[in-house]
């Protein structure tokens, strides 16, 4: 068995992964449910004795209402702490008008009756509100068997002779003093988040988190091979080299990956054959052109001779440009770390030394990984075009968000919007808008765009509002530019 050819554990198919995730989520939720009910302490519930509760309230109320208003909140809090209750004093007017007295659960109603009897001369009103479970909720429509069940229960104040009466659940005893202020008595509140620590809530929230986490994990793992296919497709559109997609671990996507790899190879082979054929044809044309030129030189001086030699020179220029373009494509220059700012400054200096106007603005250093000779040829063509057709070139470099932005502007007549794309076509010269005497064979922009796109970038042309044409180049780079510094006077604006 060859190492790496087979795997001990073949990757799971997409359907199997989804089924495994579903089963894992169900088992995890069940385990969480069992752990919550077995490990979490059951919720605590305080049961108050009616006679004990009456005694604590009758002990606290006279003392609180007898004190000054500024001392009542403190006394109410201290009384509540001593009796495991929550007692709160409210000034007159803060509490809304209470509901009229209503019949509550018999134990609470008997507490109210006892307090009204014992505190008759010290308070105006006593209202008891049943605030819910545990215990029966008397706001519901309850059916009692026998029908006279409620009539058989003891009513009225609690007597000393009878047994203690348990009081369950949440309640509020609102007592209005003679001065109109209120005293609220309630059971001690549990911590704010205590309700969420009950097994029911823990199980519910935990189940949502478990299912969401497992689903997200499975979806990402299942779609990761698709992300690799997308990355390979994007790379195919930005480079001339084949970027084969590894088939290991792709499962259902392996067929697509294999087809993409085959497509990349065929496209690369097709382009190489076309480029080689173009280079061969251009090279073979040199011999008959040379013979034609020699024969033209033997002609007597005339206007026809001059025109013929001019046409031959133009054909020679086209063939040389084509050979250069094809040769650069076939050489496959290796990439290296290049200082783009220094390269642009050097090109502007070169044009300035030849008494041509070329200005640079931007950082002094900005590095990216590229083919140096090819990148230099692309920007040399763009700057040269700006000088040919616009008399000057204004070059600007900026680095932002991992992208290098280069603009090359001129002061020429520009290009009509509908003809911008035509300017990038090989051997296409837009003589209606550009200078006919400027020379060239129409390969400069085509070569520049081909090089820039091969580096994952893009180039656009636009007419400037103040006049002239501007070439906008975007190149990916993850290396930040150095701070600007002085550039040779011939190039820096």
Image (tube, grey):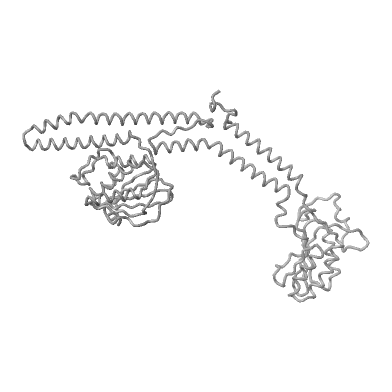
| Residue 455, percent from left and from top | 38, 41
Report the residue that reaches farthest toward the right. Answer: 161
Question: Can residue 410 be seen here?
Answer: no
| Residue 285, percent from left and from top | 21, 30
User: Is 240 above or below relative to 125?
Assistant: above
Image quadrant of residue 159? bottom right
Side of 456 where 441 appears, left or right: left
Give the residue displayed 28% in from the left and 48% down from the top. Answer: 383
| Residue 399, percent from left and from top | 40, 51
Side of 75 where 295 appears, left or right: left
- Quadrant holding the N terminus: top right
43 and 24: which is toward the camera: 24
221 and 133: which is toward the camera: 221
Picture mark count: 0
Question: Can residue 399 be seen here?
Answer: yes
17 and 158: which is toward the camera: 17
| Residue 237, percent from left and from top | 40, 37
Report the residue that reaches farthest toward the top. Answer: 1
User: Is 181 above or below relative to 14?
Assistant: below
488 and 102: which is toward the camera: 488
User: Is 133 above or below relative to 249?
Assistant: below
Image quadrant of residue 103? bottom right
- Quadrant holding the C terminus: bottom left
Side of 159 where 281 appears, left or right: left
């Amino acid at each position: 068995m060859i190492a790496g050819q087979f795997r001990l554990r073949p990757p799971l198919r997409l359907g199997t992964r989804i089924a495994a995730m579903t089963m894992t989520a169900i088992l995890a939720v069940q385990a969480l449910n069992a752990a919550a009910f077995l490990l979490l302490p059951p919720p605590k519930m305080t049961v108050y004795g009616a006679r004990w509760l009456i005694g604590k309230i009758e002990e606290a109320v006279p003392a609180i209402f007898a004190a000054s208003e500024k001392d009542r909140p403190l006394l109410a809090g201290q009384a509540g702490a001593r009796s495991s209750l929550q007692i709160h004093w409210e000034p007159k007017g803060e509490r809304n008008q209470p509901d009229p007295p209503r019949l509550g659960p018999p134990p609470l109603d008997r507490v109210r009756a006892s307090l009204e009897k014992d505190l008759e001369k010290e308070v105006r009103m006593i209202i008891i509100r049943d605030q819910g479970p545990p215990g029966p909720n008397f706001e519901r429509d309850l059916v009692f068997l026998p029908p006279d069940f409620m009539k058989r229960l003891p009513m009225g104040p609690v007597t000393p002779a009878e047994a203690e009466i348990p009081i369950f659940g949440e309640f509020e005893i609102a007592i209005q003093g003679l001065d109109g202020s209120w005293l609220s008595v309630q059971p001690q509140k549990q911590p704010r988040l205590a309700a969420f620590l009950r097994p029911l809530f823990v199980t519910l929230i935990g189940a949502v988190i478990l299912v969401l986490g497992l689903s997200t994990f499975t979806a990402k793992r299942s779609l990761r091979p698709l992300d690799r296919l997308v990355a390979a497709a994007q790379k195919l559109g930005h480079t001339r080299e084949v970027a084969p997609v590894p088939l290991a671990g792709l499962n259902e996507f392996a067929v697509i990956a294999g087809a993409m790899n085959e497509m990349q190879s065929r496209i690369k082979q097709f382009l190489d054959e076309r480029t080689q054929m173009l280079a061969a044809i251009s090279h073979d044309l040199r011999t008959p052109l040379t013979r034609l030129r020699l024969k033209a030189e033997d002609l007597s001086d005339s206007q026809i001779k001059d025109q013929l030699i001019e046409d031959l020179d133009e054909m020679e220029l086209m063939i040389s440009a084509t050979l250069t373009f094809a040769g650069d494509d076939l050489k496959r220059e290796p990439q290296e770390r290049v200082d783009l700012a220094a390269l642009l400054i050097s090109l502007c200096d070169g044009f300035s030394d030849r008494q041509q106007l070329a200005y640079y603005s931007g950082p002094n250093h900005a590095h990216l990984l590229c083919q140096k000779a090819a990148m230099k040829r692309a920007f040399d063509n763009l700057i040269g075009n700006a000088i040919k057709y616009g008399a000057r070139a204004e070059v600007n470099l900026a680095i932002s968000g991992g992208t290098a932005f280069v603009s090359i502007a001129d002061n020429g007549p520009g290009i009509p919007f509908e003809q911008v794309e035509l300017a990038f076509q090989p051997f296409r010269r837009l003589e209606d808008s550009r200078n006919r005497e400027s020379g060239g064979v129409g390969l400069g922009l085509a070569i520049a765009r081909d090089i820039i796109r091969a580096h994952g970038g893009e180039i656009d042309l636009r007419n400037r509002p103040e006049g002239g044409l501007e070439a906008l180049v975007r190149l990916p780079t993850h290396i930040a530019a150095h701070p600007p510094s002085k550039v040779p006077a011939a190039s820096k604006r």
